Amino acid sequence: MASIKATGLVKRYGTVKAVHGIDFEIADGEFVAILGPSGCGKSSTMRMIAGLETVTEGTIEIDGKVVNDIRARDRNVAMSFESYALYPTISIHENIAFPLRSAGMNADEIDRRVRDIAEKMELVPLLGLKPQGLSSGQAQRVGLARALVRKPSVFLLDEPISHLDTRQRYRMRRFIKQLHQQYHYTMIYVTHDQEEALALADRVMVMSNGLIQQMAPPDEIYARPVNAFVAGFVGEPPINFFDCRLARDGGRWTLAFEGQTLTLPERLSDTAAQLGPEALAAVRPHFLSIGVNGPLVLEGKVFVTEELQDQNLVMVDVGKVRFTLVAHPSVRPQRGEVVPLTIDADHLLLFPQDNSRRIDDDLAA
Amino acid sequence: MYELKAVHKRYGLAKVALRKIDLTVRDKEFLVIYGPAGAGKSTILNILAGITRPTTGDVLRDGVSILHLPPERRDTAMAFENYALYSHLSVGENLAFPLHARGMARAEIDQRVRRIAEILGIGHLLDRRPGFLSGGQRQRVALGRAIIRPADIYLLDEPVGHLDAKLRHKIRAELKALADDLNATVVFTTTSSREALALGDRVAVLNQGRLEQIGTPADLYHRPANAFVASFVGDPPMSFITVEPRREADRVAFLTPDGMPVATLRADALDGLRPADAAIQVGFRSNEVRLAQQGDSAALRGRVDVIEHLGHSKIALVGIGRDQVSVSVPAHTSIHVGEEVAIAFPRDAVHLFQDARAVVHAVPSV
């Protein structure tokens, strides 16, 4: 049971500022993913919560108590790292039992807990082995088990499943999610993988340059990104961006791009008026289609089609910009073919070219 | 054409990297070797390049053994996951190196270096030394240096493994187009299902040194030879339900332990099915099943265990008895953990496995 609150949180390493003064609250039992590229400040933020880094400025509260000066081991916060450092000379069983022995728990209870977690994580056959025989995926699971066995009130995971292949990643991801549903730990999960963040978290906190760009539930992060950074970082395949010029033509706004002109839907008029002549347009691959399927139609040339069996990814060049679209497996245009490309008017996004906050907040509402 | 004939590779006494592999690399094909870490993917590339010698077995080029040929006398171009670049040369010079070595004219070298650098998004880095590059940038330089020159065969060992998702996506498309343009023979290793399906003319699935299956992406996806391939190819992985067979005249019905019917197939389609008590599983892809609506005849009842957002869609993981089935649903679907749901599945999209080997794939016509 623990809620977390950060106020004006700053982390400086010498002259380098890693976290630039951020505020956030995480409710008791909530699962939050901190998502961002390397160097965005996500690990520093987590390490300050864990007590592994000092807070340069601002405060961190756990359950309403400022913990800036409380030592890591007294915070009842458990952490699993990407670099699962296991003790090489003792068995997997003893590695997992280690935090419990340090806490002075009795041997029967330790054994019961280790068995329990090992069963859940399919580690039972490994309990008698030493760490050196393990694959990296197995070692990662042991690291996770060792953090979980303490039943902490806050559970911090730093890229815990980045070394696993697709199949194992799904398995672990679902395991972690079910663990959360079952025990209601307050969980914070740091990752650079947008799919993991969306799949796991109740809310995603997207960070870049030491600042929180957006903190919202996964569907909102995906459908209503507040700026071009969030739009570009979230989504697979990645969103399509193109620089364009906006102009007023009678009562409607138009968008000019690579010598082609589109009339914007009424919905975007206010946004267009605020953005001025230069803007960055964006549309997700799922909202583009080949053929004339609406009013916003560009003409492009097919570059390549990737057949993923459940869907096809088609790359289409419009001038110098390469668009990716997701199509039904039966859509297989030839390379070099000139095709009409329809943008779903309900899902076109407009951003300022300088990447500040998106203005059309009513989008896709 | 390259052939591995019963290639076995052992390191030391205990570690077997490859187990009697037979594998053909056809001329001008893009062959992807796909498998988990430690499957033996890199060992195959090293054997083709002549860097590693098989313990037993033979390697042929156009029917002639090349086992005795040292690496420098095989016309292979190779990019490693761990990019070895010349640290004292600039990026441009690193890229140009294989071309200088072949005595190409300066103007043509410049032109090729620029083109490759542009394709890989490193055009602005040509004057830098490798020491000043990020891991992803170095990896692109190493890839560029491998593909810049003509070669009989290109061996690319997880060449985009260290790049972020956006770059991987971009470079994957470029590689595919480039290989088409050059009519090149390429062997490419990866741990990503998506990459394997997107790039491969054929894909060889490797697991613990064994070749599990080789075929076109459609073969692997629609007709996986066994449960490993079924669960390893495709994203999300195929889900399985354990069933028991019950004969009904000329048909066999497959039921869950709770007695819910999962599939009914004509008995004569089940030649491969052994009457023995080996476990039988039915496999479903997440997009072959959906939440049932009223009027659906075939439906399995279960409870939602997990919901995963994937942006445009969600995956509901539905518990049915002791098994769990992934169902792909549109992002706006209202569905909650703990909810009782019914899953509908087309009767003809059934993958049946016994003892983890495929018995039958009744696949809808594509």
Image (cartoon, coloured by chain):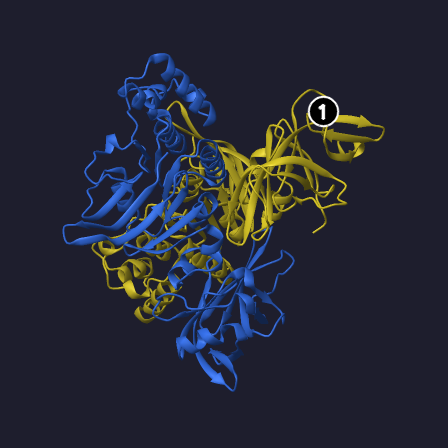
Chain colours: A blue, B yellow
> Quarter of the image holding residue B272?
top right
Count the labels in the image: 1
In the figure, is residue B2 to the left or right of B294? left
Q: Give how far across and how far down residue B143 sits, in percent.
A: 37, 54
> What residue did someone put label 1 on?
B274
In the figure, is residue B119 to the left or right of A250? left
Residue drawn at (38%, 22%), measured in percent from left and top?
B13
The vertical placement of A219 against A180, above or below, is below
Residue drawn at (62%, 61%), measured in percent from left and top?
A332
The vertical placement of B136 against B344, above or below, is below
Q: Residue furthest toward the bottom? A: A250
- What subunit carries mark 1? B
In the figure, is residue B162 to the left or right of B134? right
The vertical placement of B125 against B12, above or below, is below
Q: Give how far across and how far down residue B53 sits, in percent.
A: 40, 35
Q: Which of the two residues, A328 or A279, is positioned nearer the viewer here?
A: A279
At label 1, counting other C-alpha atoms closer than 10 Å, the crowd grade (few under 14, some 14-19, many 20 or more) is few
